[in-house]
Image (cartoon, rainbow, N blue to C red):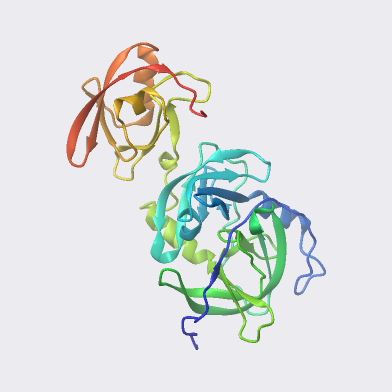
Amino acid sequence: MDTPSAPSKTLCILGITATMLLSVPCMGAPRCSDAAVHRVSSAAVAIELTTPGGPAYGSGIVWDRAGHIVTNHHVVAAGTNPIVTFASGQRYFGTVVADAPDRDIAVLAVSVRPDVAVDLAGDGTERNGQAVLAIGNPMGQGMSLISGTLEARDQQIMIPPGTALTDLLQTDLPFRPGNSGGPVFDCAGSLIGMAAATMPRNTGMGITGYVIPASHLRAVVASLGNTGPLAEATVPTPSVGAPDARPGLGLMVVPGLDGTLVVDRVVPGTPAAMAGAAAGDVIAGLNGRPVSRVADLSEQVQRRGVGALVVLTVSRSGRNIDLPVRIMPVNFAS
């Protein structure tokens, strides 16, 4: 099968958001199922990031009910402090817990357990000419649904900064900036793939939308999580500083894939920040006692209570550092 060479024109990278229920004509059936569209809509999220020039937008797929969101690497690389908005309108901070830049796939985690996840039951037997649909957040203007046709398989493109994406699906879906990371699915509501990139057609009429196949998403996400779907333990847990202002240190801690506890974020102005804790620190212990689970760390902090002075030992650049921290009421949402 012929594989096109890397396009000479710059690819427009995409994104996704809220939902608009539509009935769309499908091959072999008068209309797509509204129920299928609604199910996929519930499993699509909008992603907003902070950049020096203003907000950047993308889309994502609710991968499982443990709170993992699959999107493109180029979406999460476009800015910082990702905020994930569900179809319900609820918004949560997201944390990048796994990333595969060479496949343009990344995994975010949120500290909520979604009620709905994407349907991964597709068998990978999509055929050229079949109808496909996509849900995304073009230009950050809210979720919308578009329909198109699967035109070819096993395509290859090059995206900035020179990454080759192979085995892609080619469609005529009119992706726009902000659709990247959003789900592409069939009329049964099964995931076909994830919106990745678009480029103008050589004729100057219309655009080509490229999709990372669902089989690739499954394989890459499984490899990022070592043994299949990412372990639920990788979801960030605000156990040492929660929204209800319990006793805390002001840390967002995530379990590392190697069994360690890693500081993902330090809330400015909190005790941990004033003591010098930093994102990327590996927590080695509290008051001289080893800590290997988020629950253990949270329990020790809660038991000592507000006002207690503790010594948080972190590993940084190969050496252990003792940080004296006074437990204070912490509102993690601040």
Rendering coords of residue 294 (x, y %): 37, 30
| 81 relative to 285, above or below | below
Residue 33 drawn at (x, y percent) = 77, 60
Q: Residue at x 54, y 51 (%)?
A: 63
Q: Is residue 149 left or right of residue 92?
A: right
In the current view of this chain or complex, which residue is farthest to the bottom? 2
Say which residue appears at 72% left-offset and 60% top-offset.
145
| Residue at 77%, 55% in the rendered image | 21
Looking at the rendered structure, the number of numbered marks drawn on it comes to: 0
Q: Is residue 323 above or below residue 220?
A: above
- What residue sits 53% from the left and 64% below the top? 214
Q: Is residue 118 above or below residue 149?
A: above
Residue 219 drawn at (x, y percent): 44, 62
Q: Position of residue 169 (x, y in %)?
A: 56, 74
Q: Residue 260: in sight, yes or no? A: yes
Q: Residue furthest front?
A: 53
In this rendering, does residue 124 appear at all? no
Picture quadrant of residue 23? bottom right
Which of 227/332 is in front?
332
Question: Is residue 23 positioned above or below 238 on the image?
Answer: below
Residue, far left? 319
Where on the picture, by quarter, is residue 183?
Answer: bottom right
